[in-house]
Image: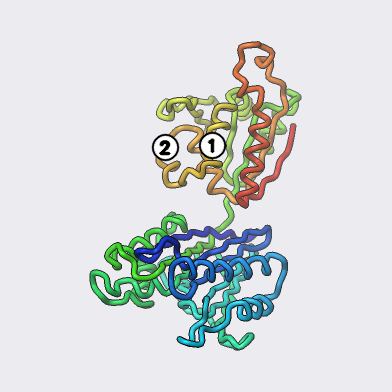
Amino acid sequence: MKIRSDIGVAQLKKHGEELCGDSVEIVRTGQADLVVVSDGLGSGVKANILSRLTTKTAATMLRQGGHIEEVIDTVAKTLPMDKVINAAYSTFSILQIKNTGQLYLVEYDNPGAFIGNRNKLFTPRRVERIIAGKKITEYELEVDDQDWLVLTSDGVLNAGTNGRMNVGWGWKRIGSFIEDSYAEDRCAQDWAEEIAGLCNTLYGEKPGDDVTVVVVKVRQPVHVSMLIGPPQRKEDDRLVVRKLMEAPGAKVVCGGTTGEIVGRVLGRKVFIDLTSVAEGVPPVGMLPGVDLITEGAVTLVQTLEHIKGNTHLKELKTRKDGASRLAALLKRADSIHMMVGMAKNEALDCNDVPAIYAYKHHVIRDLMNTLRSQGKDITEEYF
């Protein structure tokens, strides 16, 4: 895996409408990410149905291996022209980014994409051709770390019309704002929300059109390696710790006893971080060479709640407790390797042990499945 895509979506519905007339469909596979953006003719329920039909059709066909020409032909026949105003019932942009860095983008009647690297726009080569009677624009290029794209509906270009300035924002002004607002450490979602937020302000907080902003930031993959619980055989302690320390990316240890084992093998002392104390969450440990040491079962359960409840990454990054910090690491990760120790916890033989400890391995399995469902590449190993 050479690159990964961080994708953020922000939308505003036209003032007075119940639904946004634009639709976005995102499909993540092991080899590529697909993004389909569509703007339905008009606004409200009818536009929403038309745009959703477009995105669902295109995404489903592409997911099943359909060629782009087949997709465009199908969409074009499904959504003919409005003969009264000579406009398409639905426009679309289809983006495919492979994890090898190959990018393909096709646009039909949507505003041109903003493409850049760090804080500078650039204009890649593009080709115009006719498919199924529709004039489309295609881009093919290689992307790498810190390249990005911003896809928009025309409600973004029109921001300001009938608003406070009564002047359309326009492609060049948007491009300048995007360049100025770029930040390497800002996630795609936050960036998309900032652009949409400015559109809302320009519209006087009463958007005159549906607004869609899709930000795609290309970056190097983020790896996390986790050691959860001691190995079944004590003689495997050194092997497990060596595997953890040699693994790529951030290193996490879950469980107090497990942390002590890692510290002993490395010849270092684990210190308790008292600033991480939070209600209901045990404090974290500190050990040079390890990014995070947490308590086991309780922290894993609360981490799972953050992941399932989709607690915003921005909120998690402001907290110091172990569950929030672990959830933030897992949310940012593209691939996670879980090393699970199978040692029996003698304390579980006591009758007054909380049930949460007995079900720790069920929690671990639930966490793995939840992360997989969110597009994470999860590998597992047992000791």
Asked if one can make out residue 267 in the rendered structure from this viewpoint, the answer is no
Residue plotted at (50% across, 67% down): 48
Regarding mark 2 in the picture, which secondary structure is present there? loop
Q: Could you tell me residue 162's position as x and y percent?
A: 27, 73
Image depth: mark 1 or mark 2 in front? 1
Residue plotted at (62% across, 38% down): 367
Regarding mark 1 in the picture, which secondary structure is present there? helix
Asked if one can make out residue 337 in the rendered structure from this viewpoint, the answer is yes
Amino acid on which disc 1 is placed: Glu
Q: Could you tell me residue 278's position as x and y percent?
A: 43, 27
In the image, is residue 320 above or below residue 20? above
Residue plotted at (46% across, 46% down): 312
Which of these two is toward me, 30 or 207? 207
Residue plotted at (38% across, 63% down): 196
Sequence-first tag of 1 and 2? 1
In the image, is residue 349 above or below residue 255? above
Estimate how packed mark 2 is, as few (under 14), some (14 to 19) or many (20 or more) residues with alpha carbons within 10 Å: some
Outermost top residue: 351
Q: Could you tell me residue 230's position as x and y percent?
A: 68, 26
Q: Which residue is mark 2?
A: 319
Q: Which mark is residue 305?
A: 1
Which of these two is toward me, 36 or 237? 36
Estimate how packed mark 1 is, as few (under 14), some (14 to 19) or many (20 or more) residues with alpha carbons within 10 Å: some
Quadrant, the N terminus: bottom right
Which of these two is toward me, 5 or 3? 5
